[in-house]
Amino acid sequence: MKYKIDTPLTKYNAKEAIKYLFETENLTHQAIIIHQLNNFINDADVLIILRDYIYKNSYKIKNYSNSLDTCGTGGDGLKTLNISTTVALLLSSVDVPIAKHGNRAASSDSGSSDIIGKLKIKSEKSEFRLHQNMKKNKFTYLNAPLFYPDLAKVAQVRKLIQTKTIFNYMGPTLNPLGAKYQILGTINKSSAQIMTKILSRINLKSFSVFYSHDGLDEISLFSPTTFFTKNNKKINKKTVSHKFYNKYLNKIPNFKDIKGKLPEYNANRLIELFSGKKDTYRDMVIINSIYAMMIFKSKLKFNDCFEILTHSIDKGHALNHLEKLRK
């Protein structure tokens, strides 16, 4: 049954509406359907219908499941630096295999694909090269539209909408290499709960979904952060005060230090960090990296990870690793 644009979207006709969304070239119709789909952001069943449709039409490759993804939902509207991408690059410099999934900016000035491009790190599609990158460099970047052509079909309308949509919830669930470990930042309690439900249904070995109480989709140095973490098939919830990190910081947190701009600026700030600049951006990246590292290497403690990660930056390993990835 063909979906008619003047028909209200419900759980019962969601499949037909989603099919029409990707078949039509009418941007207005696409925007109407996305707007209606946004009403189901907290409905795991509709999210899974959308996810399954996108996955069905994807370019499929052999999994590299012993890897970690740092892809979050984005959409916090705070236009910060590309923290999750920086975390991914830092982690790969300390031998955590990173299958970083991402896209161009939809609701910010610089998405992960934008900064990766400015850093001159190649986005690969070849299964052989992707696996080779993982084995050799512990890092590969997975540009979502290369694997999920349906996402490219709605890229223009998402850019026009310029706000968080249901698609912010899709990327983190669709890692092309099937990474079995994930740390996923989102913007509020409701988003964190729904992402926890979805990740629980796609059989990851371990993950942590979190939201900061100040609206950042990163582990914040400015307010408490609540985590939903899967370990040994159980989901544990905990809230950590930002004051816990004070003894690990180089300076009193300053939000200006993590404000991003266009991709070239964000790329240069990342290089500055890896070159040794000590500010709130560095502190944010290290704290976020610690939690990601503990998801993949569960035997390591917070202090262990802190020492490993700061050593990688301070001894130039992270910068050398970045230069290797850019060749």
Image (tube, rainbow, N blue to C red):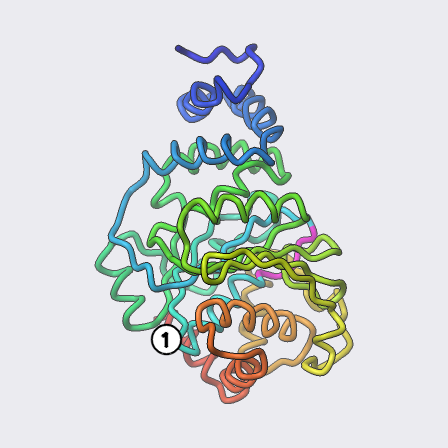
Please give the name of the residue rendered at 41% of the width and 75% of the height, measured from the top-left corner.
323
Residue at the spot of label 1: 324
Secondary element at image label 1 = helix
Q: Is residue 322 magenta?
A: no
Nearer the observer, 159 or 254:
254
Picture coordinates of residue 66 (x, y %)?
Answer: 34, 64
Q: Residue furthest left?
A: 128
20 left or right, relative to 279: left
- In the image, 264 versus 152, the foreground residue is 152
At x 44%, y 73%, the residue is 297
Residue 281, compared with residue 308, is above or below; it is: above
Magenta residues (range): 78-82
Check disc 1: other Cα within 10 Å, few if <14, some if 14-19, many if 20+.
few
Q: Is residue 35 left or right of residue 128?
A: right
The correct choice, above or below, for 34 with respect to 168 in the image is: above
Residue drawn at (61%, 72%), measured in percent from left and top?
287
The quadrant of the image that shows the N terminus is top left
On the image, the x and y values in percent for residue 306 come to: 57, 81
